[in-house]
Image (spheres, helix red, strand yellow):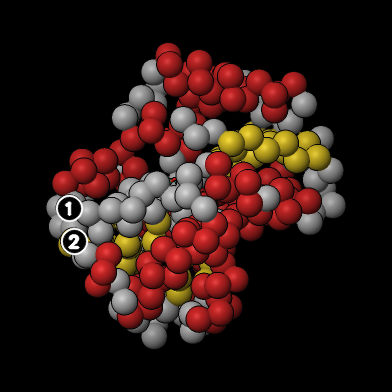
Amino acid sequence: MNSGKIGIFDSGVGGLTVVRAVNSLLPAESVIYFGDTARVPYGSKSPETVIRFAVEDADFLLGKGVKLLVVACNTASSVSLPALREFADVPVIGVIDPGAKAAAGITESGAVGVIGTLGTISSGAYQKALKSYDTVNRVIAQPTPLLVPLVEEGWLDHRITEMVLREYTAPLVNEGIDTLVMGCTHYPLLRNALSKVLGVNIRLIDSAEATAGEVASALDAKGLRSDNLQGQNIFYVSDIPLKFQENAQRFLGKAIPLVTHIEVGDLH
Ligand code: DGL
C-alpha cells in the first residue's frame, strides 16, 4: 500500500493547483488525476448533478486502486463528500474543511470572507465549516462566477480582472474581513491580483495548500506514506486532452506531455 497512488479529481484543469500543492509538500507520492473536462463546469450545475458526476469520477479513480481520494474541486467538495465517503473504501479528503481550518487559525477579527462558484457558495459548506470554529464570528460569502473564465483565458493580471475583483470583493471589504478564503481551484492563480485589490491587511487562504497539509496528516494517520524516492503523476481527462495540456502549464507550473482520454461512459 505504501507505494499506492493518491487519486485526485476535479471538474477540469483547476484541480492541478491541488496536484501542485501535493507534489510540492509530498514529493515521494504518486498521483493519478482525473479532470472531467467533458462536463466542466460543475460550479453552475445543480447539487444533484454534481454529486452524480463526483461519484462517477471517484469510481474511476477507486478502480485504479488509489490509497486515498482527494476531491480537488471546491464545488464537488461542497456537496458530494457524504455520498463519496459512503461508497469509497479509502479516506476521502475535500478542500472545504482544510481551507476553513486554515482561515479560522489565522483570522484576528473573526470576520472571514469566502469566494467561490455559485454552487460552492449556495451549498453553504464553507459558511458552515468556518462557523464551527470559535475564532470565526462572521462569514461573508460571495459567489464569483466570472473568475473561472478569466483565469482560463489567462487574464491573471488584466485590468478587467482587477475591475471584476474590485466589484466582487467590495462588499467583503466593507464588512471588515481580515481573511479571505480562495474557495475555488482557479483562484490561487489570482493571488497577486487579489493582493493588489485587497491590500496587505487581508490574508488570503489557499485551499489547495491547506488540503495538501491535510493529505499529509491523513497518510501519516493511516501509515500510508509512500516509500518511493520520487513520485510521478498520471493524468486522465474526459474530453480530448489538447486544451487541458495548453492550460496545464499555468496551473501545475510545468508541461504535461502525456494525458490519456477516457470517455465519460467508461468511467465505471
Ligand atoms: N473546479 C471548480 C471549483 O473548484 C471550478 C470550475 C467549475 O466550475 O467546474 O469549484
The residue sitting at 31% across, 67% down in the picture is: 32
Identity of the amino acid at label 1? Ile
216, 183: nearer the viewer = 183
Q: Residues within 10 Å of mark 1 (few under 14, many from 20)?
A: some
Which disc number belongs to residue 261?
2
Of the two numbered discs 1 and 2 on the same chain, state the one appearing first in sequence: 1
Q: Is mark 2 within 8 Å of ligand 1?
A: no
Calculate the distance from the C-alpha at mark 1 to the C-alpha at mark 2.
6 Å
Residue 5, can we see it?
no
Viewed as shown, does residue 85 lie left or right of 97? left
Q: Quadrant of residue 226?
A: bottom left
The residue sitting at 22% across, 65% down in the picture is: 263
Q: Determine the secondary structure under disc 2.
A: strand
Q: Residues within 10 Å of mark 2 (few under 14, many from 20)?
A: some
Q: Are marks 1 and 2 in contact (CB under 8 Å)?
A: yes
The residue sitting at 55% across, 41% down in the picture is: 118
Q: Quadrant of residue 196?
A: top right
Percent of width and height locating residue 80: 54, 64
Question: Mark 1 highlights which residue?
Answer: 240
Percent of width and height locating residue 89: 49, 84
Percent of width and height locating residue 212: 50, 58
Identity of the amino acid at label 2? His
Viewed as shown, does residue 110 lie left or right of 81? right
Q: Quadrant of the C terminus?
A: bottom left
Which disc number belongs to residue 61?
none
Viewed as shown, does residue 253 lie left or right of 157? left
